[in-house]
Amino acid sequence: MFSNLLLQSKAICHNKFIYFKLLFIWLNSIVFCPYSYAEVISTMTNIIQGTAPYLTFDGGLTPASNTDELLTIQLPDGTIYSKTDNQSSLSNPIILPANGLKLGDIITFIPAGQTSISMTDLLNNNAFWHDLDGDDEMIATGNFRLVAHDIKGNEISLNDSFVDCYAPYSIMLQNDAAILSTTYGFPNSTLINANNVIYYITPPKGACSYAAQPNLTLSNSHNNGSLGSNYSGPTVEWDDVKGFKLQDINNHKLNFPTTGANNFFFLMDLMNTVANEVNYVKIPSNSGINLSITSEGSKIKIRLTGPEAGASLNEAITAVPTSFILYSDKEKQNKIYSFTIKKWFIAQTGDGLSYHDATQYCNNLGYQLPKIEQLTNASLDDINGNIAGQPNHYQRRIGGGLFSEWGEANDEYYRGSNFKNNTNYWTLASSQEDLFEDKDLDTNEHINLDTMEFNNQTVCISPD
């Protein structure tokens, strides 16, 4: 009875802004409060009427209807992005002001070193609530958190650096639905709705921003369940998501691709670049190899065109070693990529041929059958590609051969290329024995042995 009365007395006096120590509050309520003992007793049967606490971001002047103001990030250079002005997307990410930044360098309302905070602490620490009744104690249910992922869907930590090979990154800020409550008065609680925002960010352009993406199969993470591993090339050259990284924009011979065939293509994820603005220079200008540049979703599609099956000898021999320099503008001021096609391949159409007929087919074009290492860097027994110890399947490397560079080379992916699925292709024999090496085009991209009387498909390579 006494304790209940004590609380009611405190509430009445509190509303009149008379505050004293709890030890003497009962006495003080009688002496100083402009209510009689009977009036205090009578309030025990009545609920104190007041106003609900509310969310605010201007010191209590204005109630806020949502938590949008909490869903803000600040970059290390001071640039601030909020939910209301967020226009970032996978194809239009926010570009960070410098390389080497970590997730922890992005400033939010969550204390440094943490990825979550209770709504109680967040609102109290920043004075983001107010109560006109004068209550100064508040609790809120729920939490406020930060979650970030790279382009592969892997969650990253505060200590992880942003790398363009795994960009764009998504940074999500979210708060749970929460109830903001104070101790006294009625009403004494307010519902805060759940809310979230996703910001897409990327570091400045690096080797992967200018990566060239052929068919990603086969690689360690795109192997169609094939046996074995070690499909992916060294990380300085290859990324399972981005493809081949730019090696040196000023030395086009070091970059992918070094081989090509009609209708082979690669994609480039060039932010803020549109296909009809991309231009190129070709050296020599009279080469029979050309480029077709179009849009493929948010990416740029670079398609090779040149001599194909049915070409005459005069047409076929125009596919000489050719260098290309790509620019993001029609004025050819901003260089974005370069490469040199050293070898051109023509795939035969129709039924398979014997080894001798395949040889003659290529000779008629002024071409020849390719060596094993010109198709793949796989190895089998004493037949070695260009990587010591590599199993009987290729590894994605620049200059590793047609299939090693372009992945599964079939007409399903590279439409109009005339390369067939699940097909063997003849390679140049090292001797006139009855065993000749050929290349299995699909699945594990491995070397098989066949006799010269067998019929296999034919692909021809431009002369040295």
Image (spheres, rainbow, N blue to C red):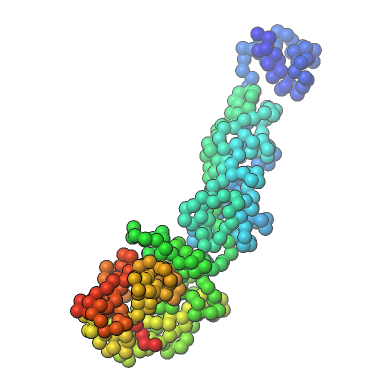
Q: Nearer the viewer, residue 57 or 242?
A: 242
Residue 266 visible in the snapshot: no
Residue 13 visible in the snapshot: yes
Q: Nearer the viewer, residue 54 or 414?
A: 414
Tell me which residue sits at (53%, 56%) in the image: 169
Tell me which residue sits at (66%, 56%) in the image: 76
Question: Where, quadrant-wise, is the C terminus in this rendering?
Answer: bottom left
Q: Residue furthest right?
A: 31
Q: Quadrant of residue 386?
A: bottom left
Horizontal and vertical percent for residue 157? 57, 49
Q: Is residue 163 depicted above or below 184 in this figure?
A: below
Q: Is residue 65 depicted above or below 134 in this figure?
A: below
Q: Is residue 47 depicted above or below 210 in this figure?
A: above
Horizontal and vertical percent for residue 454? 20, 76
Tell me which residue sits at (56%, 67%) in the image: 206
Tell me which residue sits at (47%, 56%) in the image: 152
Q: Residue furthest bottom?
A: 314
Q: Quadrant of residue 174?
A: top right
Horizontal and vertical percent for residue 425? 28, 75
Horizontal and vertical percent for residue 111? 65, 44
Q: Quadrant of residue 356?
A: bottom left
Number of numbered discs visible in the structure rendering: 0
Question: Where, quadrant-wise, is the N terminus in this rendering?
Answer: top right
